């Protein structure tokens, strides 16, 4: 039987995390599973709210180490400050799968089964990701095309995408709605949001997990890219549904989140798009992203 470790990174969203894990418990009632909530030094003291959840250990960090580093902690440790016992239900401590969920996710019925079926049907698939729904039930643009120089112009929140949502560039960057409309079982995509992704542990370990140089945002694109470079695939599974309003943690410090988004975007661009530090495109990207972050936070 497949075993899974559910990893939730919490920052000032303890009540949401409890609700998320409640939906997980209902979905995984017949599955060997364990949960790890990594609290990134939430200033609102939410750790106590997270204690006592069946199957779940809470790791209380003394400082905010960032999203990717916290997920890596949840996957393999170290766990220096721990609240509550970690049940090792029939070997779940050696879980074959890692299910990363944001605390504001609510898993819908049969979502996990659909993701597992996709991994079973595609041995070269490292990550299976569900259809994410916004709070109003609309499809979230969680499946993405490989970031390039046009992504900033035709990204998820750009004005050009807003006014020209059917353009080829926008649809290449944000294919989720097209895949839902096509009623596909699953489809290979370049990358998916880490708000909800089911990962083979072997693949995750092979690339040493998330790059901890990304404090917040873009670590998911980087992970999918590094996996793809090793021959692994990422698949989007529309029939697996998770409700994800989004932005719960970022809303507690939106200016900081915005700056980190742009810093991480530059890290991805410099790592995977234009590797040469002397290329003029690197300088332009640095300037453009810095100015865009300033404009968004002014």
Image (cartoon, helix red, strand yellow):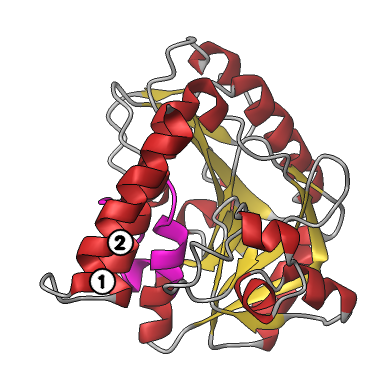
Q: Nearer the viewer, residue 262 or 103?
A: 262
Q: Is residue 141 visible?
A: no
Mark 2 vs 1: CB contact within 8 A: yes
Mark count: 2
Reply yes or no: does residue 100 show up in magenta.
no
Q: Quickly name the residue at label 1.
A: 281
- Label 2 crowd (10 A; few <14 / some 14-19 / many >=20): some
Residue at the spot x=87%, y=81% of the render?
Answer: 182
Location of the N terminus (image quadrant): bottom right
Relative image position of residue 70 (x, y in whole percent) = 38, 41
Image height of 32 relative to 202, above or below? above
The quadrant the C terminus occupies is top left
Residue at disc 1, secondary structure: helix
Tell me where the magenta segment starts and ends, as one range.
204-224
Work out whether residue 286 or residue 208 is closer to the camera in this orientation and state it.
286
Q: Secondary structure at mark 2?
A: helix
Q: What residue appears at the point 69 percent right and 87 percent down from the top-left corner? A: 121
User: Residue 209's image quarter?
Assistant: bottom left
């Amino acid at each position: 039987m497949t075993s899974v470790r559910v990893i939730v990174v919490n920052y000032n969203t303890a009540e949401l995390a409890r609700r998320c894990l409640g939906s997980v418990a209902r979905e995984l009632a017949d599955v060997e599973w364990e949960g790890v909530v990594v609290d990134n030094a939430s200033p609102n003291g939410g750790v106590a709210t997270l204690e006592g959840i069946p199957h779940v250990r809470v790791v209380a960090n003394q400082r905010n180490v960032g999203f990717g580093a916290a997920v890596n902690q949840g996957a393999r440790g170290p766990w220096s400050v721990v609240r509550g016992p970690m049940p090792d239900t029939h070997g779940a401590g050696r879980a074959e799968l890692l299910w990363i969920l944001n605390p504001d996710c609510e898993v819908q019925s049969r979502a996990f089964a659909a993701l597992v079926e996709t991994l079973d049907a595609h041995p070269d698939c490292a990550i299976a990701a569900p259809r994410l729904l916004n709070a109003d039930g609309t499809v979230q643009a969680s499946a993405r095309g490989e970031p390039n120089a046009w992504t900033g112009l035709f990204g998820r929140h750009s004005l050009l995408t807003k006014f020209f949502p059917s353009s080829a560039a926008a649809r290449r960057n944000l294919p989720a709605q097209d895949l839902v409309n096509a009623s596909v079982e699953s489809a290979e995509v370049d990358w998916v949001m880490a708000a909800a992704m089911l990962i083979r542990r072997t693949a995750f370990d092979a690339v040493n997990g998330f790059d901890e140089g990304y404090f917040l945002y873009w670590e998911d694109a980087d992970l999918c890219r590094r996996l793809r470079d090793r021959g692994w695939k990422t698949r989007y599974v529309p029939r697996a549904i998770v409700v994800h309003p989004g932005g719960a943690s970022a809303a507690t410090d939106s200016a900081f989140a915005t700056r980190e988004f742009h810093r991480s975007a530059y890290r991805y661009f410099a790592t995977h798009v234009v590797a040469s530090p002397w290329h003029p495109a690197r300088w332009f990207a640095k300037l453009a992203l810095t100015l865009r972050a300033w404009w968004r936070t002014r």
